Amino acid sequence: MQRTLAILKPDCLEKRIQGKVIQHILDAGFEIRGMKLLRLSRESAGRFYEIHKEKPFYNDLIDYMTSGPVIPICLEKENAVADFRKLIGATNPANAEDGTIRKLYAESIERNIVHGSDSPENAVKEISHFFTDGDFI
Ligand code: CMP
């Protein structure tokens, strides 16, 4: 079994489709081990996206990710990291395959509904950004 981190982003909650997206994730066979509703501070979002600090889109990314509440979810499944990336589709919804969450619901590369960890190592780090041992079911 492997774990990955999903974040339902502010555009997902603004559109009030968090229920649909969670159902899509459950239908694909993922177990929810932890889930929170919170608003990221600029400091917390900055630490989470530290890897992108030098990128031209960094400031916009932090503005956007702190613009409203988000739902971080710890998911578990065999091959969870790769399978979840496949389920959500390409970062830019214009390039996402039919049937993926981003193809169905996302409007742009920034407002792309959902985050998914890109490697097992990053999944461990990202899960610990939001959850501690006592949080898991
Ligand atoms: P995510 O995979 O959650 O983590 C980094 C985010 O940066 C990415 O989703 C995009 O939403 C956002 N982003 C904004 N602009 C770009 C860009 N030009 N290239 C890649 N990611 C971008």
Image (cartoon, rainbow, N blue to C red):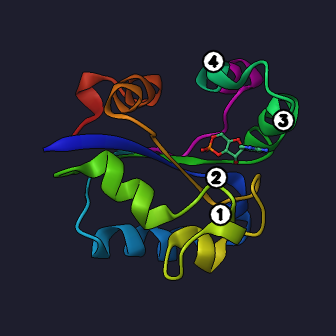
x and y, in percent, of residue 41 in the image: 71, 26
Q: Nearer the viewer, residue 89 or 50?
A: 89
x and y, in percent, of residue 33 in the image: 25, 46
Q: Nearer the viewer, residue 60 or 67?
A: 60
* Residue shown at 76% from the left, 69% from the top: 107
x and y, in percent, of residue 80 in the image: 27, 50
User: Which residue position holds label 1?
Assistant: 12
Part of the protein shown in magenta: 36-46
User: Which residue position holds label 2?
Assistant: 9
Judged left or right of residue 133, residue 55 is right
- Find residue 30 and name its label: none
User: Which residue position holds label 3?
Assistant: 57
| Disc nearest the viewer among 3 and 2 | 3
- Indicate if the residue with disc 2 has its beta carbon within 8 Å of ligand 1: yes
- Find residue 47 and name its label: 4
Residue 44 within the magenta-colored segment of the rendering: yes
Q: CA distance from mark 4 to mark 2?
A: 16 Å
| Disc nearest the viewer among 3 and 4 | 3
The three-letter code of the residue at mark 2 reads: Lys
How many neighbours does mark 2 have within 10 angstroms: few (below 14), some (14-19), or many (20 or more)? many
Q: CA distance from mark 3 to mark 4?
A: 15 Å
The secondary structure type at the circle numbered 3 is loop
Classify 88 as above or below 53.
below
The three-letter code of the residue at mark 1 reads: Cys
Q: CA distance from mark 1 to mark 2?
A: 5 Å
Which quadrant of the frame does ligand 1 lie within? top right
* Residue shown at 65% from the left, 26% from the top: 49
Judged left or right of residue 126, residue 56 is right
